[in-house]
Image (cartoon, helix red, strand yellow):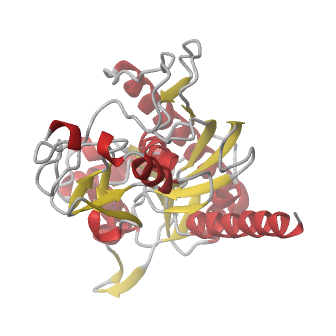
């Protein structure tokens, strides 16, 4: 019991450290937490795993039967940016529109429910300028949950030069121009030529209009000029660099939420794929609704119909002159109890039509 507790604590600490690492580099991920278990099951309430956007899973939330379902649900949560509840069970249950239901494909016929919470990187704001207000804005932006960095610049002909491609490469969502008279046009030109969703400019309305005309002269289109917000934030009668930065960051916060609300409304209005949430009927051990199609290098498990990668299969049996591959030891044991009851697939015949059970020969 002490060893199990130590392992659980160690796993939790490792996951927390990994979360912090992924957050610091702006990589999305999702954490799956087991919130209900019906025995027999190889997991427990509170078990957690972290799933990266490429499907890599860290931690433990149960055996191989549920692993693929949890990984795909986590990747969907990351793509949509929305948490979800997932039930994996063959137990009859009333429909619940808030729960995504899946049949339990394992012979154990246990049940589990998970809560999956995605974590997406905060928007990145790139601050242009070496002024006190620029440094203060960087610090304040981080305090309100944004990622922020000062724009990299290099000495160009006649002064500072900024690179729009570098902003796109960094994935900047916002640009804040805090140059305040030192390379205003070059900074604004680079920001507007980037794909940043919004560009905020610390300047008076009169100066902002002059800079808009300068951008038109430089060939910036009206669609991008419309992305310019100047003054950068609400009027708070700012005088000091700290107060100027506070107003600009207030503008960033407002724009962030406006864009997120617009995206949510657009998503709600778009046609959504229907997710089956009806009660899952009881299934025989290790039976899945459909047999996956044939694929090179894969084999169809004759017990549950799951597609198994031959090169990495851990559960293998030689029977009747054939090598039979299984997704888990439960299926292997079920086959060994009565192998004559199962159709044995051959490579290239995903439906098993190449062979027949012994009693049909």
- Residue at 22% from the left image edge and 38% from the top image edge: 359
Percent position of residue 74, x then y:
49, 46
Query: Viewer-proximal residue, 152 or 143?
Result: 143
- Residue at 37% from the left image edge and 56% from the top image edge: 326
Query: Viewer-proximal residue, 75 or 86?
Result: 86
Query: Viewer-proximal residue, 142 or 99?
Result: 99
The answer to which image quadrant residue 147 occupies is bottom right
- Residue at 26% from the left image edge and 38% from the top image edge: 291
Q: Quadrant of the N terminus?
A: bottom right
Left or right placement of residue 350 versus residue 46 in this view:
left
Q: In which quarter of the image is the C terminus?
A: top left
- In the image, farthest residue toward the top: 94
Percent position of residue 230, x then y:
47, 45
- Residue at 63% from the left image edge and 38% from the top image edge: 115
Residue 171 seen = yes
Percent position of residue 264, x then y:
46, 29
Query: Viewer-proximal residue, 269 or 296?
Result: 296
Percent position of residue 300, x then y:
26, 50
Left or right placement of residue 243 versus residue 100 in this view:
right
The answer to which image quadrant residue 322 occupies is bottom left
Label count reads 0
Left or right placement of residue 256 versus residue 199 in this view:
right
């Amino acid at each position: 019991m002490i060893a199990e507790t130590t392992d659980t604590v160690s796993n939790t600490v490792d996951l927390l450290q990994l979360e912090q690492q992924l957050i610091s580099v702006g990589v999305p991920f999702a954490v799956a937490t087991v919130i209900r278990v019906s025995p027999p099951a190889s997991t427990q309430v509170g078990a957690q795993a972290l799933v990266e956007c490429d499907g890599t899973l860290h931690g433990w939330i149960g055996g191989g039967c549920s692993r693929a379902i949890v990984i795909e649900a986590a990747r969907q949560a990351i793509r949509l940016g929305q948490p979800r509840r997932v039930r994996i069970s063959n137990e009859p249950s009333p429909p619940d529109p808030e729960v995504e239901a899946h049949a339990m494909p394992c012979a154990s016929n246990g049940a589990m429910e998970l809560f999956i919470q995605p974590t997406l990187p905060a928007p990145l704001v790139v601050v242009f300028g070496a002024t006190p207000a620029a440094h203060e804005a960087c610090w304040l932006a981080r305090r309100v949950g944004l990622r922020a960095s000062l724009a990299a610049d290099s000495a160009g002909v006649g002064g500072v030069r900024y690179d729009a491609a570098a902003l796109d490469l960094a994935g900047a969502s916002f640009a804040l121009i805090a140059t305040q008279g030192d390379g205003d046009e070059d900074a604004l030109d680079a920001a507007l030529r980037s794909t940043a969703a919004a560009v905020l400019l610390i300047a008076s309305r009169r100066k902002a209009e002059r800079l808009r005309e300068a951008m038109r002269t430089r060939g910036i289109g009206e669609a991008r000029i419309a992305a310019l917000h100047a003054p950068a934030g609400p009027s708070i009668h700012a005088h000091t660099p700290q107060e100027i930065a506070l107003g600009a960051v207030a503008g960033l916060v407002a724009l962030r939420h406006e864009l997120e609300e617009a995206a949510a409304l657009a998503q709600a209005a778009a046609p959504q794929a229907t997710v089956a949430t009806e009660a899952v009927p009881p299934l025989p051990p290790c039976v899945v609704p459909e047999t996956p199609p044939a694929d090179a290098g894969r084999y169809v498990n004759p017990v549950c119909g799951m597609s198994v990668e031959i090169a990495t299969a851990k559960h293998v049996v030689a029977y009747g002159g054939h090598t039979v591959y299984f997704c888990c030891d439960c299926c292997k044991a079920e086959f060994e109890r009565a192998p004559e009851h199962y159709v044995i697939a051959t490579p290239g015949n995903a439906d098993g039509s190449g062979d027949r059970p012994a009693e049909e020969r």
